[in-house]
Image (spheres, rainbow, N blue to C red):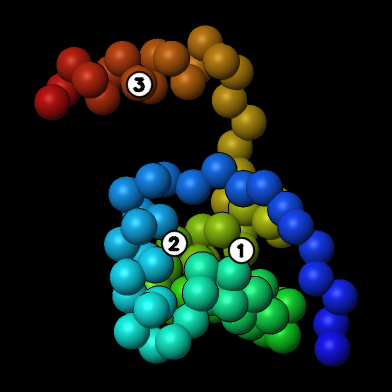
Amino acid sequence: MPTKERTNVYLDKELKEKAKILFKKYGLSLSDALNIFLAQVIRENRLPFEDLIPEETLRVIEDARKGRNMKKLSLEDLKKLVDERAGSS
């Protein structure tokens, strides 16, 4: 049997309570559900809901990780872009 360890995490109170109600329907405690989530992450070596991320966003993330389609911007350049876009809306 795996060794258990107590840990503290900060959870949104409302989400936690709603999740506990849902998990109870499946006969799971919050700890059981979190352990299942962590096991899934480790087994797949990724977040298990990555499929919910739009394909275009995944491509942009991959490009950023590989340094493709990237342009260096100074903080001032970024501020100008934000101001320009705010003015055009």
| Residue pictured at 40% horizontal, 77% vertical | 23
**Callout 3 secondary element:** helix
Q: Position of residue 48 (x, y in %)?
A: 54, 77
| Residue pictured at 73% horizontal, 78% vertical | 42
Name which quarter of the figure residue 85 lies in: top left
Q: What amino acid does circle 3 point to? A: Val
Q: Find out whether the residues at labels 2 and 3 contact each other: C-beta distance under 8 Å.
A: no
Q: What amino acid does circle 1 point to? A: Glu
For the C terminus, the image quarter is top left
Name which quarter of the figure residue 44 lies in: bottom right
| Residue pictured at 44% horizontal, 62% vertical | 57
- Relative to 74, say whether 20 is above or below: below
- Relative to 15, say whether 59 is above or below: below
For the N terminus, the image quarter is bottom right
Q: CA distance from mark 2 to mark 3?
A: 20 Å
Q: Extreme left residue here?
A: 89
Q: Position of residue 39 (x, y in %)?
A: 69, 80
Q: Position of residue 53 (x, y in %)?
A: 41, 68
Badge 2 crowding class, 10 Å Cα cut-off, few under 14, some 14 to 19, many 20 or more, is few
Q: CA distance from mark 3 to mark 1?
A: 24 Å
**Callout 1 secondary element:** helix
- Relative to 24, say whether 11 is above or below: above
What residue is shown with label 3? 82
What residue is shown with label 1? 62
Q: Earlier in the sequence, mark 2 or mark 3?
A: 2
What residue is shown with label 2? 57
Q: Earlier in the sequence, mark 3 or mark 1?
A: 1
Residue 37 seen in the current view: no
